[in-house]
Structure formats: structure tokens, C-alpha cells
Amino acid sequence: MFKKLLFATTASPVCDNAAKVAFDLEMKWEAKLIVFHVLGVPGRGFNLQVTDVRTGEREEVSQDYIDWVKEEMRTTYGTLLEESNAEIVTAVGDPAREVLRIARKEDVDMILMGAHTREEDIGATRHRAVAGSTMRKVAKAARCPVVIVNRPCTTCWRLFSNIVIGTDFSKASTSAFLWAFKLAREVGAKLHIFHAVDIAAEGFTQPSGQNAIEQRIKESRRRIEQTYLPKLKDFDKFSVEVWEGIPYVEILKFARDRQADLIVMAHHAREIDPEEAELGSTVEQVVLRAACPVASVNHPDKVADLV
């Protein structure tokens, strides 16, 4: 299923968790792994200097500088590279734009990256609860799923065994579901289909609203059974759950309960052109808090054969 993987990294500790997952998947799938680092944003005109994305310092772009950066990357990922045939590639430019460019050029099946590229981004998260700008831009425009690894994955090692697909019944969620199903079927994982009835959005704030909540739960379960289960055909390793609450909180609780090693969600919920959609608030909060990798699916390209 995965022939080419792209690991976008700054070769700094903030990307270590994503690195472990990327190299594990490469070995599991015997895939081609591209370890990709953008050196920095170039100056204007014919200036051959860049602002290093790691240090923020101005550097002269020369073959010596490029060789030095690649050697630093080999040192950083030395242990992981020992059993790998990964290719280290660098580029100059805007990080998000260059990641998307090489992903399109190489026609990769998956992009792996951290939720942030700099330590200060993580600090900001604690106050603003927002993901890094590079990840947001890549997730918005990528033609393939983007797997975001924000914390150490304690349940996954070279294999996905429990995959949670969080759906809101939007068109984008259908693409996410099909990709999750394709992956679960390929690796023999159990697929957990989950929906959270949003009590805040529905205005269920009074005790008398419980009957209405329970009715919505029944309707949602029926919708899953009618919309998604027929697509599974003879695949029987699945479960269906509908809970009520704040969606991102319930998804995180459910994933923890099922010992999920991957959460799959649509990049956004609104019926909107994928090219225009921003990262949805629910998936963003899940990305920042999940104990396992989160796959954001924005385009249906990689699941066209299942539609």
C-alpha cells in the first residue's frame, strides 16, 4: 500500500517522534523513504543566503553547507538509518511549499511530519492550542494523507493493529473512512468506526435534552450502518461506536480506550473545496493531544479505487 513515504523534518528533536514512525513504516512496508529537509527561505533577488529554519541564522548556500547539513541529518538519525535505505534530500525555499512540491513530484503515498517544526511552536501550543503553520499548510494542500505525530507512540511499532476513524458524515469523512478501511484491510487491523454527537452544537445543555441526545445517537448509528458498513463487504474486523460530548474529547477518550495506534480523520468537516478548506478545529485538537499518530485526509485521490 505504501510504496513511497515522505518524512518532512527539521532534523531537530521536535521531529524525533515522527522519525521513529516514518522509519518503522519504511521497514514494515519495504517502502522508499525520502527524508526531506528544507534548508531555509532564500533572500531576495540573487542573494545566495538562506535563513536556516532551525537556527534562524543567515547561511550561505554552498555545496559545503548542503553536505554539512546532510551529515548532521545522518548523525541525528544514525541509529534509524542503519537498517534503512532512506534517501536524504534537501531543498531551499518555503518549507510547506517545498514539502508539497516533492510530494507531488515523487507521487508519495503518505507524508509524515510532526505537528510543529520548532520548539517555540510547541510552547505556543500550550497557550493558543494551535498546530504549526507548516503542518497546517501541508495538510491543507497535500494530495495524499498526512500523518502527524505529536507525541511518542506507545502502541505502534511497525504495525497498525487498531485504527480509529472519526467521522462526522461529511463528504470529506467518506474519503477518510475509505482510506482507513483500505489500510486496515491491508494490514489486518481492526477498524473502529466512531462518531461523537456534539452536545454543544446541538444545544443539549438541559437535563431534559437527554432523550433527544439518545435519539441522535440511534440516528447516527443507523447512518453508519447504512453509509459505511456496506462498503466493508466481507471485512469483519470492525466495531461501531457513537458517544455524546465534545467531539475531540470523545475521540481521544475512545482512541485511548481502544488502544489505537492510528486515528484517521477528515481534514475538515464543512462541505467545501478541499483547496480552500482550513484544518478543522476538531482534528487540530486531536492532533495536538493524541497519544498516537493522526492521519489527516483532505483529498480523495488515494482512495479513488475504493469509491
Image (cartoon, rainbow, N blue to C red):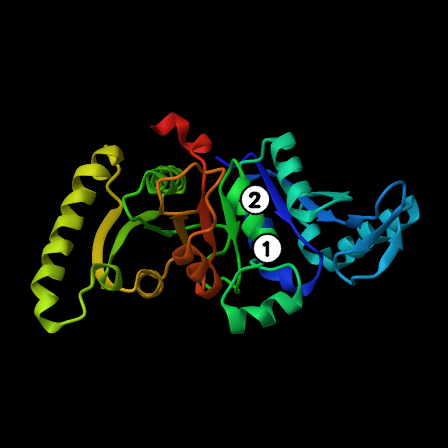
Q: Could you tell me which secondary element the residue under label 1 belongs to?
A: helix
* In front of the other: 179 or 237: 179
In this rendering, is residue 302 above or below 43? above
Residue drawn at point x = 65 percent, y = 36 percent: 101
Disc 1 versus disc 2: distance between alpha carbons? 16 Å
* In front of the other: 231 or 188: 231
Question: Residue 222, labelled with which disc?
Answer: none
Where is residue 31? Give x, y as percent. Answer: 58, 38
* In front of the other: 243 or 282: 282
* In front of the other: 138 or 278: 278
Residue drawn at point x = 52 percent, y = 35 percent: 143
In this rendering, is residue 157 above or below 232? below
- Horizontal relation, residue 302 to residue 306: left or right: right
Other residues around mark 1 within 10 Å, as few (<14) / some (14–19) / many (≥20): some
- In the orientation shown, which residue stands out farthest toward the top? 305
* Residue 24 in view, yes or no: no
> Which numbered disc, 1 or 2, marks the residue closer to the eye?
1
Where is residue 297? Give x, y as percent. Answer: 44, 43
> Sequence-wise, which precedes: disc 1 or disc 2?
2
Other residues around mark 2 within 10 Å, as few (<14) / some (14–19) / many (≥20): many
Q: Could you tell me which secondary element the residue under label 2 belongs to?
A: strand
Type of amino acid under label 1: Ser
Q: Which residue is identified by label 1?
A: 133
Type of amino acid under label 2: Ile
Q: Which image quarter holds the C terminus?
A: top left
Residue drawn at point x = 57 percent, y = 39 percent: 30
Q: Which residue is identified by label 2?
A: 111
Where is residue 118? Give x, y as percent. Answer: 66, 63
* Residue 137 in view, yes or no: yes
- Horizontal relation, residue 150 to residue 67: left or right: left
